[in-house]
Image (cartoon, coloured by chain):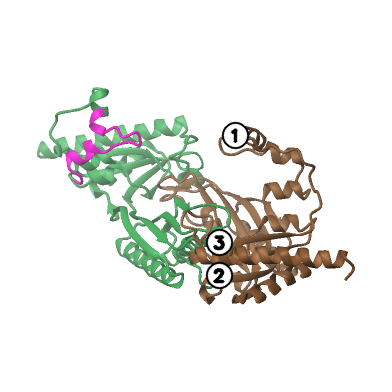
Chain colours: A brown, B green
Amino acid sequence: MLGSGVHAGLYPLEFGQASTNRAGRTFRQELERIGYLGDKPLGEPMTAYYELHIEQGPVLEREGLPIGVVTGVQGVVMVESALTGFNAHAGRAPMAGRRDAFRGAAEITYRIMEATAQFGPDARCTVCRAEVSPGAPSVVPDHVFFTIDIRHPDGKTLAAFYEQLKVICGEVVKRHDLGFSMREDWTFDPLSFDPACVGNVRETVEALGYPYRDIISGAGHDAVNVSRLTPTAMIFIPCRDGLSHNEYEHAEKEHAIMGCNVLLGTVIRHSTKAAKKNGGE
Amino acid sequence: MLGSGVHAGLYPLEFGQASTNRAGRTFRQELERIGYLGDKPLGEPMTAYYELHIEQGPVLEREGLPIGVVTGVQGVVMVESALTGFNAHAGRAPMAGRRDAFRGAAEITYRIMEATAQFGPDARCTVCRAEVSPGAPSVVPDHVFFTIDIRHPDGKTLAAFYEQLKVICGEVVKRHDLGFSMREDWTFDPLSFDPACVGNVRETVEALGYPYRDIISGAGHDAVNVSRLTPTAMIFIPCRDGLSHNEYEHAEKEHAIMGCNVLLGTVIRHSTKAAKKNGGE
């Protein structure tokens, strides 16, 4: 989402171009190398933006539906957290005086996961990464870096969920006498797509006679960034086992074709309506 | 403890010599390289074995005592565990159908840590290592490798503690529909050192007038292996902040001197007693 973020003014152009991969090469260097460094001005207005994507979840596949009309995107708070305790011997150090960073991370994870249900079935909570140091036999871990990813389609509920996470972290680090830091790595508010654009997608699916349902996206997409500038909507197709960001990600060819038909039909529908409007009809 | 384990017949000589470091070099190759490959027979009888060691814990330092008379060694069960779930998108996949391997690992860790107190103040529980896969943003972890290390000086209590761990693992993997494997990596039963040897240490400390306490070792030592063949005891001195297996491990020179005095005095005492006995007195 870096390119769309720069386009939409979320990040300065210089930040995007100076971003590096793990090998230390910048985005700008690589764009030059492959001949894709452009010179168009940023943030140019578009009439509309429609994005076709796999669902990245199991709902459409479970319900046997080839199309999802995406009405909006969940809000996300993803934080990078670090816990610092004290290195001790796993056999000698009494449990009472320990400052076990992994015990703290496990307790935070357990408690926020258990608390998730109270924010309803649309709430999501995932600890995607956890790195334990020193990770040596017979040594109580003195440092854990981990990420906590919470999501909800309703902004107020997401804020309450985030507050609950902070309360749990505060209680756990106090209980185990741990140092703690938390940084928001990637967050965005819940988003409703443009009603007219969503309407165009739905009308097109119905005209084509494809089974569908309305659906909320749980993931971030370029559409989230572009929607700051331009009327936007999205179309989902199923993916096998809900897998994505994974070598086994797979969409059926027939679903991809149906998705493309919906995208094409929607763009034609949008253009036709715009032409009629401009023509004064 | 590999050398003492081979000496005591716990592992075959071939196993010890074929063990490799991370660079793939064998123990035998390295012994040859540095000129230390011996030819003495294994398991030769010794009169007695006394080992001087830092405590690797905070007790002596906290209590301001320079010497610990080690009466025995805690039992250890260290298991390598693997949880296998299913890779899913952190935003899309509903909480209900998830098979989150890290959620499982966190729940097992939280529950066994909370259960530890019921086995008394001598019980120890540590998760020293945890590796989370794939460890990618927005992906529910589908695999966690982690080690669980539980210890107790009483064999029956340690067995009950281990049973409790297995019950918790069984409940958690069922609840989150996870695959599970557990392998005992390093275990030994609690051990009481030879009463006559422990008595020699205690008499020596008292004769020298050093403050001391009896103490149970929480860590494995060569003495544990050697005690299978030979009457054995150990002497502890304090170490700063209980740190060991760590670059900041540190013992005060005065404590090291006192420890050496106790070791020397104990060996002389042991030899004198043996000579008197052989002399028929």
Q: Which residue is mark 1?
A: A24
Give whichever of B68, B225 is nearer the camera.
B225
- The magenta stretch is B10-29
User: Label 2 is found on which chain of the structure?
Assistant: B
Residue at image position (35%, 37%) is: B22
Residue at image position (53%, 58%) is: A244
Asked if the residues shown at circle 1 and circle 3 are in contact, with their CB atoms under 8 angstroms apart, the answer is no
Residue at image position (47%, 64%) is: B104
Name the image quarter holding the N terminus of chain B. Answer: top left
Evaluate whether label 2 is on the same chain as label 3: yes
Name the image quarter holding the C terminus of chain B. Answer: top left
Name the image quarter holding residue B93.
bottom right
Evaluate whether label 1 is on the same chain as label 3: no
Give whichever of B235, A38 is nearer the camera.
A38
Q: Which mark is residue B95?
A: 2
The local secondary structure at tag 1 comes to: loop
- A11 sits to left or right of A264: right
Residue at image position (65%, 56%) is: A78
At label 3, which amino acid type do we have? His
Query: Where is B216 relative to A154, above or below?
Result: above
Residue B14 counted in the magenta span: yes
At label 1, which amino acid type do we have? Gly
The mark closer to the camera, 1 or 2, is 1
User: Label 3 is found on which chain of the structure?
Assistant: B
- B114 sits to left or right of B37: right
